Amino acid sequence: MEFNNFPVNDISIRAATMGSGPLVILVHGWPELWYSWRHQIEPIATAGYRVVAPDVRGYGKSDKPKPVEAYAMQPLMDDIVGIIDACGEEKAILVGHDWGAPIVWNTAALHGSRVSAVAGLSVPYRPRPSVPLIELWNKIYDGRFFYQVYFQKEGIAEAELERDIRMSLRKIYFSISGDAPSLDSWLDRPATATLLEGFVDPPVFPGWLTEKDLEYFVEHFTAGGFRGPLNRYRNSEKDFYDLPLMGVARVKQPSCFIAGSKDVVRSFVPGRDGYANLDELCDDMRLSRIIEGVGHWVQQEAPEEVNSTLLKFLSTLA
């Protein structure tokens, strides 16, 4: 494995790269890095693919533009297309987790000629709501805490998370994993609550995240901060009005969905299974897998299951 810097979309994107063959781009979520795919890169490359796992803009050693709007969906999609161009390819297979999933779903739907297949982890491709997503969350969680609402005001979440980055990451990574207690009470707190209240800092971390792994994340977030990563959440209205086909255009390419049965994303809307009707906007959903007992960090918590499912999906594309 080696690292390359790709000049794309007027910024530089750092990425881990390995292998040769059809291009597969692995797109991480919040608050993560290319490193979240450490268990997937070599198996996919060994199977005959050229793997590129970038630090998304704002993260790690990629550039970190300051404006909030630099983290809207359009420039994030443009970054993916730019990586495809920089690799000298016409198309790529895209795989995304957490925020990386909407990035790859939307790139597949809105830049269809550049994407040959797509897999989303944790977050399905969902129909366009009638109002910007942040308005929906404000309505659903009226008078209660919801982290995406809390993230809207610049500087507040940054200050909380950067006060003790090691503790913040330990709490976030553990508390929405499959090893943690239910988050039902965390989603039912007053609007005055903060993100880390109610999260657990475990005395011993589960084996899927070693001290070395944690140190890698801590080092990079200490250097880069949380502003860029949090700015993604501050573009709900811009995305809604700038991209009228987002959540309308169908994903026509072969697609795949993987998630943990205990992922908190599944229960964001009370009384509704967020993983029902996964193929609602996908014309060729070839595989879907919900891994029992696993939480949000699915490709880190259950790498063997995720790898076997992704490789099975890739084998259907031949």
Image: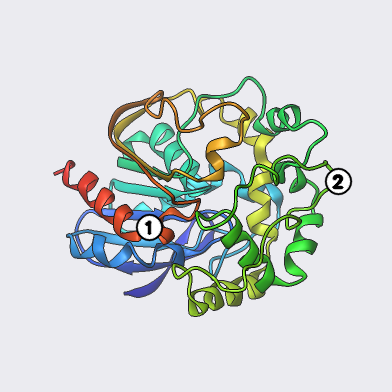
Does 182 sit left or right of 211 as displayed?
right
Residue 120 in picture, x, y percent from top left: 40, 43
Which one is in front, 181 or 56?
181
Which one is in front, 188 or 100?
188
- For the point 42% across and 61% down, which residue is it? 300
Which one is in front, 14 or 206?
206
Give the residue pinned by disc 1: 302
Does 136 sit left or right of 57 as displayed?
right
- For the point 57% across and 36% down, which residue is it? 267
Examine the rendering and report whether any part of residue 311 can be seen. yes
- Secondary element at tag 1: loop
Residue 293 in picture, x, y percent from top left: 43, 49
Q: Quadrant of residue 205?
A: bottom right
Quarter of the C terminus within the rendering: top left
Residue 233 in picture, x, y percent from top left: 66, 45
Does 181 sit left or right of 136 as displayed?
left
Estimate how packed mark 1 is, as few (under 14), some (14 to 19) or many (20 or more) residues with alpha carbons within 10 Å: many
- For the point 19% across and 58% down, which residue is it? 21
How many angstroms separate mark 1 from mark 2 (CA)? 35 Å
- Secondary element at tag 2: loop
- Say what amino acid the circle numbered 2 marks: Thr
- For the point 50% across and 54% down, which residue is it? 178
- Say what amino acid the circle numbered 1 marks: Ala
The numbered mark, 1 or 2, whose residue comes first in the sequence reads 2
Give the residue pinned by disc 2: 192
